[in-house]
Amino acid sequence: MENLYLIYPAMLLLFGTLVSALASKLEISNAFFLYFTGMILGAFGLVNFPTETIIGISSLAVVFVVFESTVKLKFKDINKFTKYSLNIVVVSFILHICTITPLVYFMFPISDDPFISFILSLVFSSIVYGIDHDITLTKKLKKNHKLVKILEVESLINRILTIVIPLLLLKYITALITTSVLPGFEVFLFFKQVLFGIIIGVVIGFFVLIVLNTKIVEEIAYLIVITSSIVTFSITEFFGLNGVLSLTFFSLIFGNYHVKHKKQLEKITFLFGHIFNIFVFILIGTKMLISFDYFFFGTLLFLVYIFVRFVSVFISLKTKKFSFKEIILVSFNVPKGIDVAIIILLMMTQYNYINGIENIVNLCLLFSLYSITLSNVLGLFSKNLTS
């Protein structure tokens, strides 16, 4: 029986690697294939992880995904297209929060508590507004193409926000439910947790930076990077602080200051990130049972989301440098990737006690399927839509 604990992860990793290789050969995103693999394995009862194991996998995935995304945000690499990416991020975030949040709140019966319903609606809109950095366009267009550069920077920023903001809001809901203090005081406690979380990330970041630049640790530098990332997140969470924000600031310090053999260290952490990507996508696939009650209004909501995305991109890229076809291509390229999958998995397991969370999960699953399908179809015509 003990061997089963090895069979499950080994089987997931094998199937995930094979379908990822197939997706790469077909030049499409591997997320859809991984979801589908999980659905098949789940239907036949071939994957059965305890809830505690899924929470552990999700938490480690958060560590590697946040680190991988944040460490790529190097201030010195800001290029001429970054301003367009930032414009899209700001405009898109504001329009999606202001449009999608009230629509979800009034269209779907989220929770019995109106305030919790509003916060959960905000959680949903903050999750789905972003795009994944492993976009379909990178498989069809050259890496230095202006659209790829714009979407790459936008998606890196979005990935961090798509993880940080929903988890902040979910922790706030937890504080509302579990904290027995005077009304309103939980807000003070919440921001106190955020502030001390950031401080811990900065302190550990600079300490690790000093250690990595000594000659003594060169041979085990990669171990220090991996373990310090995990320790930064876990110790912050252990003290009831915000581990994601702590890890974000830790990664920013690592990515923007001099470290010996940084490229090699980053490659190793990225490898671990890809392994956890496979686990998370397949595990989500095994849970992907979307209620039919959500298909009609969920589809309408997705169409509104696409329209809001188009308006955001049109406002941000309305210059002579971009054609209308290119604006369409950027607008509809909205795959929900590993960041959304991680939050879905955490909502299913770690935050499943929140009344109404299953409704948000259903909508997130539906948006993930729609967005990945749309982006892969769009990728087939990407060369025809570029100047």
Image: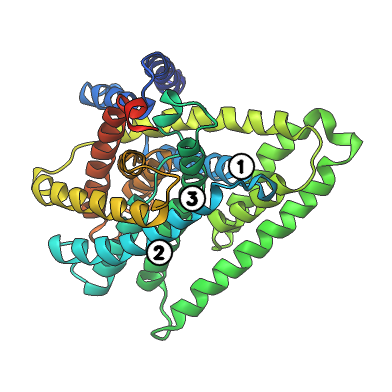
Q: Quadrant of the N terminus?
A: top left
Dot 3 corresponds to which residue? 85
Q: Is residue 314 left or right of residue 222?
A: left
Q: Nearer the viewer, residue 336 or 194?
A: 336
Measuring from the top left, give residue 186's x and y in whole percent: 45, 77
Please tell me whether mark 3 sits on a helix, a strand or a loop.
Answer: helix
Mark 1 against mark 2, which lies toward the viewer? 1
Quarter occupied by residue 118: bottom left
The amino acid sitting under disc 1 is Lys
Give the position of the C terminus as an image quadrant. Answer: top left
* Marked residue nearer the N-terminal end (2 or 3): 3
- Residue at (27, 74) in percent of width and height: 115
Question: Distance between the Cα atoms at labels 1 and 2?
Answer: 25 Å
Residue type pointed to by label 2: Leu
> Which residue is the site of mark 2?
169
**Foreground pick, 262 / 150:** 150
SS at badge 2: helix
| Label 2 Cα neighbours within 10 Å, binned few <14 / some 14-19 / many ≥20 | some
Report crowding for label 3: few under 14, some 14 to 19, many 20 or more residues within 10 A (C-alpha). many
Cα–Cα gap, marks 2 and 3? 25 Å
Element type where label 1 sits in the image:
loop
The image position of residue 346, as x and y in percent, is 38, 48
Q: Are marks 2 and 3 in contact (CB under 8 Å)?
A: no
